[in-house]
Image (spheres, rainbow, N blue to C red):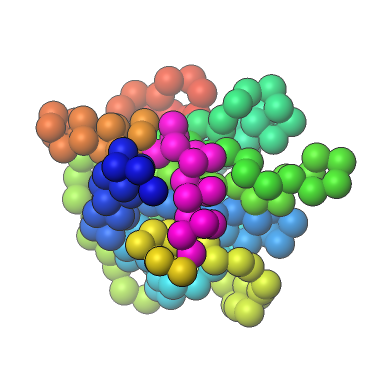
């Protein structure tokens, strides 16, 4: 790993471990998504190390924002745009809706171009602090337990044994990671809170 890539991974690991930046790993055919644990804890969800059904997260997107968000994903999957990017409201477990910015990319396809794996980031743009509640949120979870899924992207960070896979995956989404880390740094520097919708991923609160 070269010096620039090493520095990127250090910045990425710090942001992920503090929950400032989420890494997500989506397997469409399994209808399963893995979020980095600190992010799930930040939003007040239990079982931070376990994957969830995609429905569990979709049903937490604000009803007005769901269709635009899904359409942005479909545009990328069918190759109309090089990356997925959307801004939408996501319901946390205890502190209401949070305005988030998500980026992602297909990194594996199967026969006939079917997407097998998408990897991306998510950033909370909401100024007010999270106040996670106790208890279990509603929605299906247990069905994903034990589902076959290779190492999610957040677990590749710092894993010496996974170095080839880590470098391959991070190289595929290097530009997304750089953009997300720069956005996190900008939020830290300016104290910027909720952002207005950009028309590509939902409305503000």
Q: Where residue 28 sits in the image (x, y, percent)?
A: 69, 53
Magenta stretch in the rendered image: 162-177
Visible in this render: residue 12?
no
The extreme front residue here reads 2
* Residue 205 located left or right of residue 173: left
Q: Where residue 133 sits in the image (x, y, percent)?
A: 29, 68
In which quadrant will I find the C terminus?
Answer: top left
The extreme right residue here reads 112
With respect to residue 52, does 59 lie above or below? above
With respect to residue 29, does 170 lie above or below? above
Q: Where residue 203 sits in the image (x, y, percent)?
A: 43, 28
Task: Determine the residue positioned at 19% across, 50% down.
Answer: 129
Magenta-colored stretch includes residue 165: yes
* Residue 166 located left or right of residue 107: left
Indicate the quadrant where residue 88 lies.
Answer: top left
Task: Determine the residue positioned at 41% across, 70% down.
Answer: 48
Camera-nearest residue between 148 and 85 = 148
Indicate the quadrant where residue 93 lies.
Answer: bottom left
Camera-nearest residue between 91 and 35 = 35
Task: Determine the residue positioned at 63% across, 79% down.
Answer: 146
With respect to residue 89, does 130 lie above or below? below
Magenta stretch, main secondary structure class: helix
Camera-nearest residue between 164 and 120 = 164
Magenta-colored stretch includes residue 139: no
Visible in this render: residue 163?
yes
With respect to residue 72, does 172 lie above or below? below
* Residue 201 located left or right of residue 76: left
């Amino acid at each position: 790993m070269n010096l620039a890539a090493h520095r990127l991974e250090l910045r990425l690991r710090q942001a992920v471990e503090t929950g400032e930046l989420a890494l997500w790993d989506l397997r469409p055919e399994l209808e399963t998504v893995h979020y980095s644990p600190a992010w799930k804890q930040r939003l007040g969800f239990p079982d931070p190390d376990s994957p969830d059904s995609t429905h569990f997260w979709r049903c937490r997107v604000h009803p007005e924002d769901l269709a635009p968000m899904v359409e942005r994903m479909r545009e990328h999957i069918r190759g109309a745009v090089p990356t997925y990017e959307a801004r939408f409201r996501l319901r946390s477990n205890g502190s209401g809706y949070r305005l988030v910015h998500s980026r992602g990319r297909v990194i594996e396809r199967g026969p006939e171009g079917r997407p097998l794996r998408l990897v991306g980031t998510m950033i909370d743009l909401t100024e007010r602090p999270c106040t996670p509640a106790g208890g279990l949120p509603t929605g299906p979870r247990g069905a994903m337990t034990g589902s076959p899924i290779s190492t999610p992207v957040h677990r590749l960070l710092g894993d010496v044994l996974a170095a080839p896979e880590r470098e391959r995956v991070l190289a595929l989404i290097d530009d997304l990671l750089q953009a997300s880390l720069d956005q996190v740094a900008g939020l830290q520097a300016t104290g910027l809170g909720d952002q207005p919708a950009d028309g590509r991923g939902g409305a503000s609160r």
